[in-house]
Image (spheres, rainbow, N blue to C red):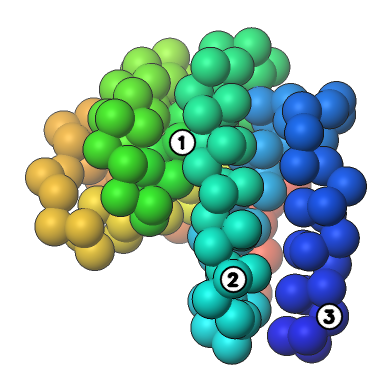
Amino acid sequence: ARELALKLTAKWMKRHSIYSKPAWLPEIIALRFINIFTHGRFFLAESDLVWRSKFFVAMRNQTRMLARTMAKAPAGIPRLRASAALALAGLCLSDRSSADLGLKRLAQDIEAQILPDGGHVSRSPEAMVEAFHLLSMVQQALDAANRETQTALRGALDRMAPMVRFFRFGDGGLAIFNG
């Protein structure tokens, strides 16, 4: 599985190393980053140094593009995902300016999308759980980087946790409505 992941990633990098739509749209870059930061250790651990170097150059280029285009992501969860992905990219790739910009935009998106009761502005439990997951990933990255937790982020997580529990059924499944 690791070899297959490396081959697929190498093919993608070869095919999309230069800007092209839809692969370089902010919402697509954000999804790609979230998946890479979630599963990257699995396939990067055994890769050779030259390939890894090419991979991180590609990540840097995509980070720059995401920083320039994230405001064009569709409103709602895609924009929150783009902000979180930029913050994660900055934190994971030791790029302080990207991390700071991502965290600043994330705070704005939290204010616009996370309601005082902890729900998502769409009132969709699925959107709320995804937002909670994204914010938790950023919080974990901040902790790992020994960076100060942002008030907006911590407050949103504190408000959202009880709401996530509220929308779970006894079997652990999520209530499905408004999405």
Residue 150: image location, x then y, percent: 18, 36
Q: Between marks 1 and 3, how big is the CA–CA gap?
A: 27 Å
The residue depicted at 49 percent of the width and 52 percent of the height is 133
Would you name the residue on which mark 3 appears? 4
Residue 141 shows up from this direction: yes
The residue depicted at 85 percent of the width and 25 percent of the height is 21
Quadrant into which the N terminus falls? bottom right
Which amino acid is tagged 1?
A: Leu
Q: Which sits earlier in the primary sequence, circle 2 or circle 1?
A: 2
The residue depicted at 78 percent of the width and 85 percent of the height is 3
Q: Which sits earlier in the primary sequence, circle 3 or circle 2?
A: 3
Which amino acid is tagged 2?
A: Val
Q: Quadrant of residue 69?
A: top right
**Is residue 46 depicted above or below 27 in this figure?**
below
Residue 161 shows up from this direction: no
Q: Which sits earlier in the primary sequence, circle 1 or circle 3?
A: 3
Which amino acid is tagged 3?
A: Leu
The residue depicted at 77 percent of the width and 75 percent of the height is 5
Q: Give the SS element for disc 1.
A: helix
Q: Between marks 3 and 2, how big is the CA–CA gap?
A: 18 Å
Q: Which of the two marks, 1 or 3, is nearer to us in this view?
A: 3
Residue 29: image location, x then y, percent: 67, 38
Around disc 3, counting alpha carbons within 10 Å, would you say few (fewer than 14), some (14 to 19), or many (20 or more)? few
Would you name the residue on which mark 1 appears? 86
Say which mark, if any, is on residue 50: 2
Q: Give the SS element for disc 3.
A: helix
